[in-house]
Amino acid sequence: MTASNISAHILIVDDDRSVRETMYEYLRNAGFNSQTACSAEEALDLIKKNNFHVVITDIILPGLGGLELTKTIKKNNESDVIVVTGYSDDYSYEEAINIGASDFVIKPVRLEELLLRLKRVLKERQLTEERIRMMEKLQRLAITDGLTKLYNSRSFYSQLELEVDRFNRYRHPFSLLLLDIDHFKNYNDNYGHLEGDKVLVRFSQIIKSCLRTNDSAYRYGGEEFTVILPETGGEEAKTVAQRIRKTLEVEKFTPQPDEDVQITISIGVTQYYPKEELSTFIQRADKAMYLSKQNGRNKVSALFAEPPAES
């Protein structure tokens, strides 16, 4: 008995009690967690309540047939299906596969063969799930920063274009924050990049904690971050920026024993203006951020192309 067998949940569907019980006992002895049903209707009721990895079904059943059961399962569930039939002349392998079955077995069923086919279906299922997880991971890596888990700069520009398109359609205001950690190079020089990375990670967590669900934060590069605030006018964006600044200001970092260090940020705020280039929009946020630097750091500064609209 293996751990993979125990975790696999199998449903056996056959109107012949002796066939059901023989398959059930054989698969149970092989270490599988199995259930049985005598009709397609009973099987569908069980499927609603349980997550079956594989359904083994006879084609000829009272009421709804095995092929119709297979179609229903593949339409509404993620279970694999192995179709069993004693009527090989009437039902083809291609017909079963075309409606979504993973395999097709001819009666009389050799239980050893059924077990091998079941294991093959489960193995292919596992490989498919692993490929899906890998693709999802690669997709996340393509759009997120590995250290901070925020979106990366590529994602930032893509999302900004979407927000501009939404603005052009609905004229709802949106704003941008550009944030830069003050004296971060000195922190890295004094305490090392590992401690600097801890600051970046914690600051990213603080940013996310201060945002709404439809806002989005990005690592723009190095110690620079951006935040896109949909449905948000300039004055409200300044409030969000102050919330982030104040939250970081009270955070204490301990890069060395018995040494607490305060980290601050300078933030630039701006609001999108109709028909302006994205580069102009971003540069204005950048200029606002440098105003905060020039005015003593740990500040929020705003620059607008016109008086900010209320959201």
Image: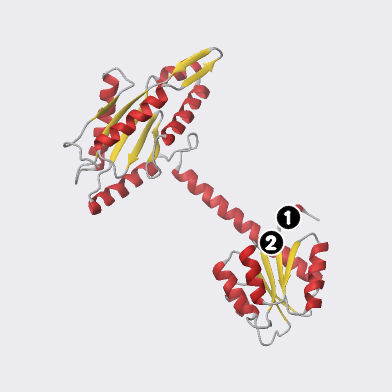
Front one among 194 and 149: 149
Dots 1, 2 in contact, CB < 8 A: yes
Residue at numbered disc 1: 4
Where residue 104 appears, as percent x and y from the top left, is 68, 75
Mark 2 nearby-residue class (10 Å; few <14, some 14–19, many ≥20): some
Task: Classify residue 46 as left or right of residue 309.
Answer: right
Q: CA distance from mark 1 to mark 2?
A: 9 Å
In the displayed structure, would residue 265 be above or below residue 40? Answer: above
In the displayed structure, would residue 275 be above or below residue 249? Answer: below
Can you say which quadrant of the picture contains the C terminus? top left
Mark 1 nearby-residue class (10 Å; few <14, some 14–19, many ≥20): some
Task: Classify residue 284 as left or right of residue 56.
Answer: left
Q: Amino acid at mark 1?
A: Ser
Residue at numbered disc 2: 122
> Residue 163, can we see it?
yes
Where residue 202 appears, as percent x and y from the top left, is 48, 29
Number of the label disc, if any, that sits on residue 155: none
Q: Amino acid at mark 2?
A: Leu
Front one among 124 and 228: 228
So how many labels did they put on this image? 2
User: Which image quadrant for residue 300?
Assistant: top left
> Residue 103, can we see it?
no
Q: Earlier in the sequence, mark 1 or mark 2?
A: 1
- At numbered mark 1, what does the secondary structure look like: helix, strand or loop? helix
Can you say which quadrant of the picture contains the N terminus? bottom right
Taking the spot 22% from the left edge, 31% from the top edge, the residue there is 303
Where residue 258 appears, as percent x and y from the top left, is 54, 12
Taking the spot 40% from the left edge, 22% from the top edge, the residue there is 249
Q: Residue furthest top?
A: 258
User: Which image quadrant for residue 98?
Assistant: bottom right
